[in-house]
Image (tube, coloured by chain):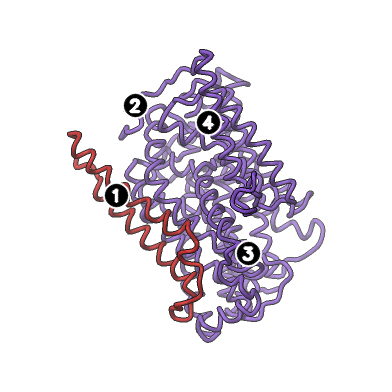
Chain colours: A red, B purple
Amino acid sequence: MTSPSKKASRLWYILLLIPFIATLWPPFYAGNEPRLAGIPYFYWYQFLWVIISAILTAIVYFATKSKT
Amino acid sequence: MNWTALTVFLLFFLFVTILGFVSANWRKGNLELLDEWGLGGRRFGTIVTWFLLGGDLYTAYTFIAVPASMYGKGAIGFFAVPYTIIIYPFVFVVMPKLWSVAKKHGYVTASDFVRGRYGSSSLALAVAITGILATMPYIALQLVGMQAVLEAMGLTGSGLAGDLPLIIAFAVLAIYTYNSGLRAPAAIAIVKDLMIYITIIVAIIYIPYKLGGFGPIFDAAAAKHKAAVVLGAKAYAPYATLALGSALALFLYPHSLTGIFSSSSREVIKRNSALLPAYSFVLGIIALLGFMAIAAGVNVTNGNDAVPQLFLRMFPDWFSGFGFAAIGIGALVPAAIMSIAAANLFTRNIYKEYINKTCTEKQESNVAKWFSLLVKIGALAFIILINKQDAINLQLLGGIWILQTLPAVVIGLYTNWLNRWALLIGWFVAMVWGTYMAASTSFGNQYKLPFGLGAGTTIYSGLYALIVNIVVAVVLTVIFRVVGLKNGKDETAEQDYVFEG
């Protein structure tokens, strides 16, 4: 593997920081409204991030997979 | 006595017991080797690892305690969700390195790695003891989870008669773990996880349907918890630091690392980082069961009874029995893996290191088998003879303690710059400080920041102790370098951390 492509693949890892920012700063989501099917924002936001975080991890997995 | 529920419970219990014994022959290996008994021969692929780690991390106690916290305290209990969100990006980046170096050098425990990396058996001993100490109350808590469902089915006798079902369940568990090693909980985890998924899918559709939808459920929760039904500004820092600290701690626990070491490749760990969040989603739903219990009019003094009582109220008896079996078996899987992990630590890092340096491989696996029995008897005795609240307090301490192995283990995966003695002193200071913080707040998990930082806000004491730990380790490393104290011999090389096996 050449070093430029290694560097490019490392950049993908930045995606993994996003879930930390989205979930560890409660002011982003500590509220009741808007509700979704009766569920307060606080709850459905965090459920949504379970899914987004898994997708981000999957993206990083496929993007950085060594092609050997 | 609820005979229908109990019968269903016992049928499933019998089934997994048979499975536990038969699993000794699964992907046959020589169970007289520690690698085979204690790590399943490091051959578990993506799917088995998914079930194993799912069964291991999301324990019976979680299923009882998280909704209990939602039932009793409100939104703060939901920290389990951000906690289990951010674990996986962390695991994705860090744990493949640990897998590689462990595979390359035959490490069975985190302590083995620390010994190899820093050339320090004292630091390795500190990590091993911390691991065993943190694991013991965790096993005891699985019994608390099981007790909650046994009581819900009417097994509420006092004295020995009351404890007998628990003793029998644990004796059976102990024997097949002794016999089959990690293969037993791996096989049983598949059954347990499928049962949990079925129970939760039914619960999330059927219970809101009966209670008139999510609107009324959250309204009922709001009526009980007032503003605490969502997070208030004062709870921001406690919530976020609990989530972060717990996430950093989870994969330092010996039983989590056993799931890492037993994987067949780095890829298995990475794929699972994207697949395990399925359990986090389920955990979120389980947390909401606490609110559903409020809406259903469940009125209990001990929050641990909220979910069992909710099931009994909403489901036909046979399905309650199924759900209880899922939780009961959910206690067996982690208890088995935890006792195996503690046994691996004792055997490798205490017995072989200090008691019998020249032991054969067969002796090594025998000691591990016996120690796994001893650990379970200890946990059982603890619950029966002492009391539940002490186990809960100790488990909280365990979380603070295990987090203090992060500098040696996780930072160690990236650099050997930190001095072994600096790490040991940092660990010691943080253990004492962490224990003091917990004890002085009557086993709360929060502590005020010093020097009026953050206007008197509190943060998770485990994370606080970790910061102290790292500061001490870094400062002392610098001082030791200045006075010319040498680092230990590092037996690992840079390419070992990307070793594919």
Location of residue B133 by image quarter: top right
Q: In screen coordinates, is B254 left or right of B137?
A: left
- Residue at the disc numbered 4: B111
Name the N-terminal-most of marks 4 and 3: 3
Which marked residue is nearer to the observer: mark 2 or mark 4?
Answer: 2
Say the numbered circle drawn on residue A61: 1
- Residue at the disc numbered 2: B494
Report in which chain the residue with disc 2 lies.
B
Say the numbered circle drawn on residue B69: 3
Which residue is more in the foreground, B276 or B325?
B276
Circle 3 Cα neighbour tier, 10 Å, few/some/many (<14 / 14–19 / ≥20): many
Residue type at the position of mark 1: Tyr
**Residue at left 73%, top 46%?**
B439
Name the N-terminal-most of marks 3 and 2: 3
Residue type at the position of mark 4: Ser
Place of residue A15 in the rendered image (x, y in percent of width and height, measured from the top left): 32, 52
**Residue at left 68%, top 74%?**
B2
